[in-house]
Image (cartoon, rainbow, N blue to C red):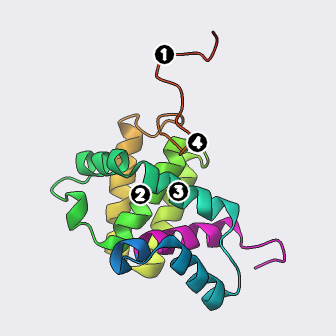
Amino acid sequence: MTAAGPSRKQARRDAVFLLYQTEVTRLGMAELVDGLRLREGYAPDDFTIKAVAGVRTTLDELDALLAAHAKDWPPDRIAPLERSILRLALWEMRAGVTPPEVAVDEAVRLTRRYSTDEAGAFVNGVLGGVIRAGQAAPAAVDDGRRGRESGEDGRD
């Protein structure tokens, strides 16, 4: 960690763990952020906060993508950690904050580090399917700021 805060990889890990913890503990975000601050010695950075908010805002859309590409694995049957990693990677790609290839690599890396190689292969397959289907394009997601409707160019 630098004086400026966590690296992007660390911020991504923090986002995954905050998403995971909101799901399995039912604690509020303020409590979880306080826990992160106590445990790690720093508060989540802007990327972490934006990513967690973005995932939570677009949860239904992200889960619909998971359901479409995780054959025989509805989102509620995917382990909470892997589900959190998948949701974050999907949000990163669709919000345009991370190139798809990087989002996939980072998701697989996190999964293999905190779960298993087999789970990493599953995450890779699901995210690869999203990319192959052309559903990883930026601006296809509400990043928490309610974007313009499809087809509008922003001019009056």
- Residue 53: which numbered mark, if any? 3
Q: Main secondary structure of the magenta part?
A: helix
Real-space CA distance between mark 4 and mark 3, rounded to the nearest whole angstrom: 15 Å
Left or right placement of residue 29 versus residue 132 in this view: right
- Residue 124: which numbered mark, if any? none
Q: Most extreme residue toward the right, as rendered?
A: 3
- Could you say which is closer to the camera, residue 104 or residue 97? 97
Instruction: Describe the element under mark 3 as helix, strand or loop.
Output: helix
**Label 3 neighbour load within 10 Å: few <14, some 14-19, many 20+:** some
Real-space CA distance between mark 3 and mark 1, rounded to the nearest whole angstrom: 25 Å
Amino acid found under the numbered disc labelled 4:
Gly
Amino acid found under the numbered disc labelled 3:
Ala
Q: Position of residue 107 (x, y in %)?
A: 48, 63
The answer to whether residue 6 is magenta is yes
**Label 1 neighbour load within 10 Å: few <14, some 14-19, many 20+:** few
- Could you say which is closer to the camera, residue 29 or residue 91? 29
Q: Position of residue 71 (x, y in %)?
A: 19, 52
Tell us which disc is closer to us: 4 or 1: 1
- Residue 87: which numbered mark, if any? 2
Mark with earlier residue (4, 3) = 3
**Label 2 neighbour load within 10 Å: few <14, some 14-19, many 20+:** many
Real-space CA distance between mark 2 and mark 1, rounded to the nearest whole angstrom: 26 Å
Q: Position of residue 138 (x, y in %)?
A: 54, 37
Real-space CA distance between mark 2 and mark 4, rounded to the nearest whole angstrom: 14 Å
Quadrant position of the C terminus in the picture: top right
Magenta segment = 1-20
Residue depicted at x 38% and y 73%: 81
Residue under circle 4? 96
